[in-house]
Amino acid sequence: MSVAFRNLNHSNAWESLRSTEPPRLADVLDRKRIDDYRAAYRLPDGATLDYRYAAKQVADSTIDSLQALADDQQIIDKYRMILDGEPMNTGEDRMVLHHLCRSERSGAVIRNGRDYGAWYAGQRKRFASFAEGILSGALVSTSGRPFESVVQIGIGGSDLGPRALYVALAGHEYRFGGTLRRGPMLTTRFVSNVDPDDASAELHGLDPQSTLFILVSKSGTTQETLTNEAFALRWLRDGGIARPRKHVVCVTSETSPLAKSTDYLDSFFIDDFIGGRYSSSSAVGGVVLSLAYGPDVFAELLAGAAAADAAALDGSARANPALIDALLGVYERNVLGYPATAVLPYSQALLRFPAHLQQLDMESNGKRVNRSGEPVDYATGPVIFGEPGTNGQHSFYQLLHQGTDVVPLQFIGFAEPQRGDDVEFEGSSSQRKLNANLTAQIVAFAVGKDDPNPNKRFPGGRPSSLLWARRLTPTVLGALLAHFENKVMFQGLLWNVNSFDQEGVQLGKLLTNQILSGADLPEALAGFVDALG
Amino acid sequence: MSVAFRNLNHSNAWESLRSTEPPRLADVLDRKRIDDYRAAYRLPDGATLDYRYAAKQVADSTIDSLQALADDQQIIDKYRMILDGEPMNTGEDRMVLHHLCRSERSGAVIRNGRDYGAWYAGQRKRFASFAEGILSGALVSTSGRPFESVVQIGIGGSDLGPRALYVALAGHEYRFGGTLRRGPMLTTRFVSNVDPDDASAELHGLDPQSTLFILVSKSGTTQETLTNEAFALRWLRDGGIARPRKHVVCVTSETSPLAKSTDYLDSFFIDDFIGGRYSSSSAVGGVVLSLAYGPDVFAELLAGAAAADAAALDGSARANPALIDALLGVYERNVLGYPATAVLPYSQALLRFPAHLQQLDMESNGKRVNRSGEPVDYATGPVIFGEPGTNGQHSFYQLLHQGTDVVPLQFIGFAEPQRGDDVEFEGSSSQRKLNANLTAQIVAFAVGKDDPNPNKRFPGGRPSSLLWARRLTPTVLGALLAHFENKVMFQGLLWNVNSFDQEGVQLGKLLTNQILSGADLPEALAGFVDALG
């Protein structure tokens, strides 16, 4: 396959895209457009996840131009290269294989005698069986008691994605061991921050005799995670556990220092081809989710993600939700000049999903050089932030409606509540009120409202899109996860940046270690160390 | 007092400010600057809270220009007008009295026979005594049991500030009834979202027989809050409580429908002069915090806030942390053109503080018309977002270091952990590692680093400031709260906008009610209602 890597503004389609005029949403937002501007995922259990973009500031001709851009940048060809194991993480000369964690396609990528699809599948079978053992009580603690609590120690991608998914499924009804359940089977907590107040608070109230830890660090050298391991081991020892590492399983790479120790209860492996922020569907997310909700729920999540990955292969932007989302985002960033995007789930269960997307997007595409290391002369990844609606409506929406900057909005919503526990009040259920608010906001932002009092005037023209499903199930959640992973990947390809490295985190580590080592420090650093000392 | 209200760019100081050149931080960041660029709060218990701004892109001459701007815009005179009860919330023709909730200065503002300072103090005494009654067991539930849990139902300002403060104090050691304690005395939860999954999840595991609710709505008509009240009342009734409103206290205005009901256990009052996002130091925050940690802890928080309010009266920007912070923010927004600000507390206890500041800032100053209703032709409030460090370092810091936009950073840090429970690992404590990271990041962002590999190059010139104290105590937290309230107020005065109304939330409410009422809908709205139906 012959592909060319070109900067966004060197694409043949760029000039024509740049000259398109955004329509006035108040003029065009009719029923036909609402029906037409939609791309859908069909999931294996019959569910659908719709991406609706009628409230984006584009015309059919804009979408044609965006399609031309996608074609010219050979986006789908490049996605296929990723799936086929080309080393698309250029700076680090690595493959990008997170998709393979959910397709588990044997034979798709074979290198140096390893069949990666089969290998990821093998890891998943191992931790599924481990989770069954813990949950059935066959695997017990060193004091002979069943494990009742699990604490994941990890930071960044080893924390944000797994935690967001854990929270998102806490209200889902599932079956395990023949019984219908809702909520985690083990008390589940997460420790990430090196601030000792984090570990101290999260371990409070747990019983060392029945607490299992998952230690997640690909390199096995993450400062925060090893420090929190030390905190946990001391806590276990103080709680009377003589061999505390027998209460710890590792998720790490085979070559990490952690993998070399036989002191741990067990280890599950990932590798350099699974980036931290893309690792939720690997053992990084899989072990804790399988322990909390059982391996079948995790398998459903993977099936939803795999279906979304397959749908992302469609070359037609109008039929490919992740591709059209990516293109619209580039249009808003580079043609319309909007600097930030708000993620607004109308679902309390998605409380921590914006924090995951913030990492996924900003760490992937917050880059100022292209994949060949040359500075780019256009804006790349935007600031991503968000909180659940309707909460945000009573908070920062004021600026979104009437501030001086336009901030594009990504709504997410569901027809039904997850817990099925609703109340009627003044003629409507909570869920109906929730979604009436969601609908009202889309239109209010897009259309605005005139008023003789300028303080009550709404300019409108504030674009949004909506991801919509019947209910937040594991398959829908998996598809949501993959949607955003693929959107971010497509945007990186459009911008011609490497979305899979993160050199920007290195300098802070270097200076931190200089301070901790007691080395002679340059003046600025020494000055601050003394000031805060 | 004669003051003039002028747009930012009509100030006599604007042109000179606009022509200042930002220094290159790598060139100027020396020990002297680090020591000099500092303004401090001195708190009544002897604690200090420092605002350090050596890593801002300003020279002494810039600060002189900013001082001239503050003088010309008569910022301190206008602050005094607020304190004296001038109706500075122009659109709604209301006074702005949240400062009086902590100074409680009798005689400062008297209108229509009400001494507001004395009245707020009276409310505080009432809810302090109520909290003592609940905590001592003198006040019991309708089933005769002591209350063991409390749930605050409120949204926006009735949720974000109180919740952030509650979380911030969860690790603080305090004394109540002669006993040293850490953590809340009642199991404390918050319900805000109209999504029924929120109430359903938060009530799970609580016992209706011993659960008290705080219903917070100034108007007494907030849709989400009344719907969640209905959810709670049904839950209480289903739990065998015959008179469920006897498990509910209200925080509302005297004129609200809630205040008229005698069914509730009790009611504590606020009024129209306490804006939602400024209400944490009123009964809105005070009732729940007094129940969780006792009235004395809440009083300490107020004392810290009152000290910060007093310090904010200093006309010299160099000596007034809130004023210099406000001025630097305007400089970054309007001269340097930066669109967003990240709030980065190196303290897990401040986990929800960025969400509170997001509302405070974006809802106050996300305005496109000035206080007279004329559109402004400059940028006002920026996007505010953030997560605790070191977590953020493994997430969105990549974009902050190497993205194409510059995002100013507000760090917050403490010398000591709150819980005093630390671990040594590889030669240093967690807390030392935490603060080594904080120090390293300030310098890395400011100074950057060259490298032959452009992918490993850090441009630097990314400005930050730091709020720093020895420990996160109630007084320090109160000062932090007031610092940001006053900073936002000062910025609103600099931009000549009304920071105390929020007309931008109205249109969504209107359209939501149109949908719920079943009225004939305009086409865009009808189209979306059908699409999501």
Image: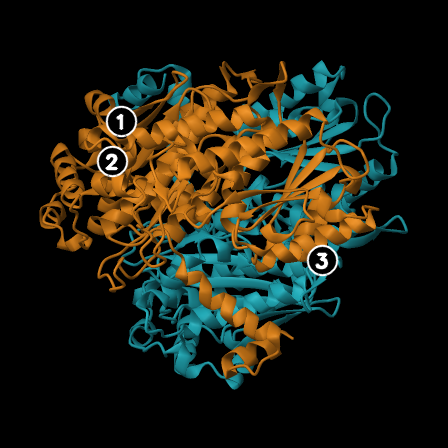
Chain colours: A orange, B cyan
Of mark 1 and mark 2, the one earlier in the sequence is 1
> What is the distance, in whole Å, between disc 3 and disc 2 at their CAs?
47 Å
Looking at the picture, tell me which residue is in the foreground, B201 or A13. A13
- Please report contact status of discs 3 and 2: CB closer than 8 Å, yes or no: no
- Name the subunit of mark 3: B
**Residue B262 is at least partly visible in this image:** yes
Q: Residue furthest front?
A: A113
Position of B178 with respect to A397 (left or right) is right
Quadrant for the C terminus of chain A, please.
bottom right
- Residue at position x 76%, y 14% from top? B242
- Residue at position x 37%, y 79% from top? B23
Q: Please, is residue B452 above or below residue A391 in the view?
A: below
Disc number at residue A324? 2
Q: Mark 3 or mark 2: which is in front?
A: 2
Which percent across, then down, holds residue B62? 39, 78
- Image-quadrant location for residue A265: top right
Which residue is label 1 attached to? A39
